[in-house]
Image (cartoon, coloured by chain):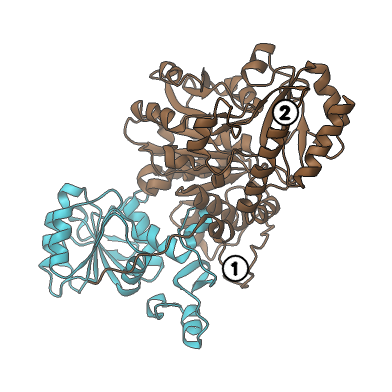
Amino acid sequence: MAEAKAERIPGFATLSIHAGAKPDPTTGARATPIYQTTSFVFDDVEHAASLFGLQAFGNIYTRIGNPTCAVLEERVAALEGGTAGLAVASGHAAQVLVMHALMTPGDEFVASKKLYGGSINQFNHSYKNFGWNVVWADPDDIGSFEKAVTPKTRAIFIESIANPGGIITDIEAVSAIARRNNVPLVVDNTLATPYLCKPIDYGADVVVHSLTKFIGGHGNSIGGLIVDAGTFNWSRDKKYPMLCEPRPEYSGIVLHETFGNFAFAIACRVLGLRDLGPALSPFNAFLILTGIETLSLRMQRHCENTLAVAEWLAKRPEVGWVSYPGLAQDKYHALAKKYVPKGCGAVLTFGLKGGFDAGVKLVSNVKLFSHLANIGDTRSLIIHPASTTHKQLSDAQKVQAGAGPDVVRLSVGLEDKEDIIADLEQALAAA
Amino acid sequence: MNHDSYPDSYIRGILNTVKTIAMVGFSPKENRPSYFAFKYLTERGYRVIPVNPGQAGKSVLGHKIYGSLADIPEPVDMVDIFRASEHVLPVVKQALALTPKPQVIWMQLTIRNEEAAKLAEDAGLKVVMNRCPKIEYGRLSSEISWIGVNSRTLSSKRAQIYGKGVQRMGLNERGGTPREAAAATGPAQKSTPQGG
């Protein structure tokens, strides 16, 4: 036969707008409708049986799946270059469902010790109740990941750009360790977004997101997402019973053999989301989808503004240091050139020579920046982690996580950069 | 044909053309992938004929199970193979011995056999390896998007409803011509024109 013409692969901006969102099949609605319904009628009894048995694709109940949320799932999966996605109520919920699919009580996972403080808390404390044991490794010493792996290890977890330290993790090097030990690499790509970095290109097997941040981008909705890269062989060592053994919940179906390279996303949905329940509201999915349509434009401006702020701060007498991988003198600049060549995102930290008290004064004096515990908003945000997000960590953990007493974290917004810098200038002067 | 990456038009063309599918290595157990594919494709208008020598003479959902391809008393358009890669070659040889010959040899997810593929292609058949027709139908009809799978398809045309119920979709988008619109609402998806 004649070879069919090669099909065009759409670019990032096109996928940001179109992936997953064909016109509504029944009404022709062009924007994705908000399917604000708990449940969906079955065509007939046989159809219901097929859906419950996972023999047909379709909608049953919004805790398990919803057409608005499904558009979001396909959109982010397409942007990350994965096989499938699963939207959930928050980034934290995404992490719980990923580990629920991978771990049984007594198992271990290796995690970078430089993570978002909320993740450190979740791994150290909440997971203990499930018998999931975290073993910490140092992203500045890649060999420490290899040393932390034991026969009980079921995953390695890192952030592409760590929050708040501005640490770029050498994803490819950690991936090589995961491959050697036949465990999946899970990468939290919240700060970079797939516009700046696609961890799957460097060997990630699962990508997780807090959609709350740059992907949604407007500070209006909490959400999380899991992307299955479709790269991991879940059946090889029989280490992952959720995926490679007959599931009693579904009359003996083996998910990996039935769903192939998107079995992980299905396991998170039909075993994790169905039974643990952290479903995303369709309304939140709609707001986040609207945000994603401008992801590439927003990330460009976020990076441009943040670099300008970082360069300005680096010259200020009140400032002891600035941590932003986009600065040429930054420790992570070389890794940034490899993993986030288009820009290093919008989160930066800096140290005030005046220490803890100067940090508290600065967040009190700003007028344009909002003092709150989030990142990835159109608005510029500021926080003093030692007195807020990282307060529960010990002093040693605070320093380890890049949240010492003098540290201030900014999430630089999309306002005019002159106004952003002017606000910092007046607030520093007043401090 | 490059068997690492099939154009959507190739897969869509096959699924739009074939009507009768012999499923070799079919399992009557309800939790097996072949049963899933059998039931799903049957519900989308294909005539699927199960083949399994250990189950010959029995029937499943009203369809008779045959012991071999040669025993099937009617022409088949496609042979869908649920056997390990090393067992594929004899199945393809049996398929090529049929009169008339089938148009398509399809090997399921994880199944590849280059020698068998070449044999079939040299005989003028189309070959698909390491894919599942249920997943491909779900992908190209947009049904699979309901479970968050990256369908790798973009379109500004709405998907066509299969006709039976609202949660079954056809393979072709609505093109807006009266003939297509009529076909889109009819029960026999196989008769819808291509394109759209």
Circle 2 packing at 10 Å, graded few (<14), some (14-19), many (20+), is few
Question: Residue B189: x and y, percent?
Answer: 41, 75
Q: Which residue type carries mark 1?
A: Asp
Left or right for A382, reference A247? right
Residue where numbered disc 2 is placed: A315
Which residue is at a point 39% across and 46% down the rendered structure image?
A: A261
Q: Identify the hue of chain B.
A: cyan
Select label 2 or label 1 by which is in front: 2
| Residue B86 seen from this side | yes
Q: Nearer the viewer, residue A100 or A201?
A: A201
Question: Residue B178: x and y, percent?
Answer: 51, 87
Q: Which residue type carries mark 2?
A: Lys
Name the chain under label 1: A
Chain identifier matching the brown colour in the rendered picture: A
Name the chain under label 2: A
Decide: marks 2, 1 in contact (CB < 8 A)?
no
Give the SS element for disc 1: loop
- Tell me the quarter of the picture where residue A71 sits: bottom right
Question: Residue B48: x and y, percent?
Answer: 30, 66
Residue where numbered disc 1 is placed: A24
A390, above or below A73, in the image: above
